[in-house]
Image (cartoon, rainbow, N blue to C red):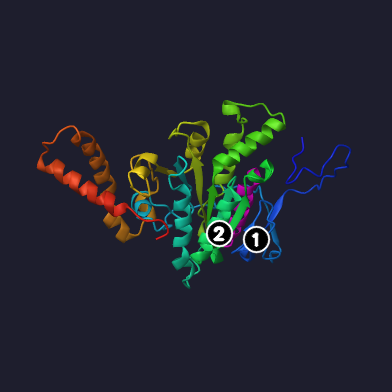
Amino acid sequence: GAVVFGNDKLIKEGDIVKRTGAIVDVPVGVELLGRVVDALGNAIDGKGPLGSSIRRRVGLKAPGIIPRISVKEPMQTGIKAVDSLVPIGRGQRELIIGDRQTGKTAIAIDTIINQKRFNEGKDEKKKLYCIYVAIGQKRSTVAKLVKRLTDADAMKYTIVVSATASDAAPLQYLAPYSGCSMGEFFRDNGKHGLIIYDDLSKQAVAYRQMSLLLRRPPGREAYPGDVFYLHSRLLERAAKMHDNFGGGSLTALPVIETQAGDVSAYIPTNVISNTDEQIFLETELFYKGIRPAINVGLSVSRVGSAAQTKAMKQVAGTMKLELAQYREVAAFAQFGSDLDAATQQLLNRGVRLTELLKQRQYC
């Protein structure tokens, strides 16, 4: 079968179709910063053509074991709950997972805005270039997001790759790979990149649509058998490189939307197994006014204190344990009023910590 990139309205029966004989590639480079492009790297922001002459294939292989080193540099999001409890390192893959309207995109956008102070500094090694890939979102949502980044003066170090809901399924499938190639340019040139895929569940749906039309045999939930490979080959491209290979990094923040908090569905389990850790957002906490609505018990950090500064390590060392004890005690406290002094102290401390970790959006 053949897949059409873009509008199929002009193609009719009897037309002569020629193959290009080329593998899909996209423009990359610092010239793309501050621009909004589609999945094929064409400018869609009305600011004229892109100035980049460098092009890269979208489906490059992930780096092997030898060029990589373990993650040790912190990638600060500016969100207290994330930086203290589930710290992210440069070169990591951190999944943001939760139901719709729980603040997944807000965490991603906050992270981009927080990089402003690093990017305005003189130290090139601390700068973090951001790529935001919008998959299957409304055009108005993408426009709002670009305005938000422009108002915060964050567009100058950000590339937005957009494959909206009205775009063809092949473009929604391709957008994350295109964005990743743009991010790899920074990684391979000794710089640091951050890529946000918002969200990969929509990419999987687009891939399912394509596969069914191409008559591929469907598997669980009608997804094709290689849907796991679809995400693993994308997320494996995020890495912290050895100093002999430039010492750059590419950090990935994939977003996955769950249905009614079901983390055991097909796509969420696939992506959880591909990522290093996850930030789990809960609707219940969101409606209680605990925002960001991070469930500390289900959110996991495998890098932990290795991706934290010394000061943060000292402050956040026992915080996760205290919050876990608080949740356990709070569950029992609602059944009885007579509590011993130690339990009461745990409850008071837990309430204070919860309040301390609350944060407004874009602050």
Tell me which corner region of the image, top left, top right, bottom left or bottom right, holds residue 235. Answer: top right
Residue 309 location, x and y as percent?
35, 59
Check disc 1 and report the residue beneath it: 45
Predominant SS of the magenta segment: helix
Tell whether 251 sits left or right of 182: left
Disc 2 marks a residue whose amino acid type is Val
Placement of the N terminus among the 4 image quadrants: top right
Dot placed on the residue nearer the N-terminal end, 1 or 2: 1
Circle 2 Cα neighbour tier, 10 Å, few/some/many (<14 / 14–19 / ≥20): many
Q: Are marks 1 and 2 in contact (CB under 8 Å)?
A: yes
Dot 1 falls on a residue whose secondary structure is loop
Check disc 2 and report the residue beneath it: 146
Magenta-tinted stretch: 173-189
Front position in the image: 340 or 48 = 48
Farthest front residue? 140
Front position in the image: 235 or 323 = 323
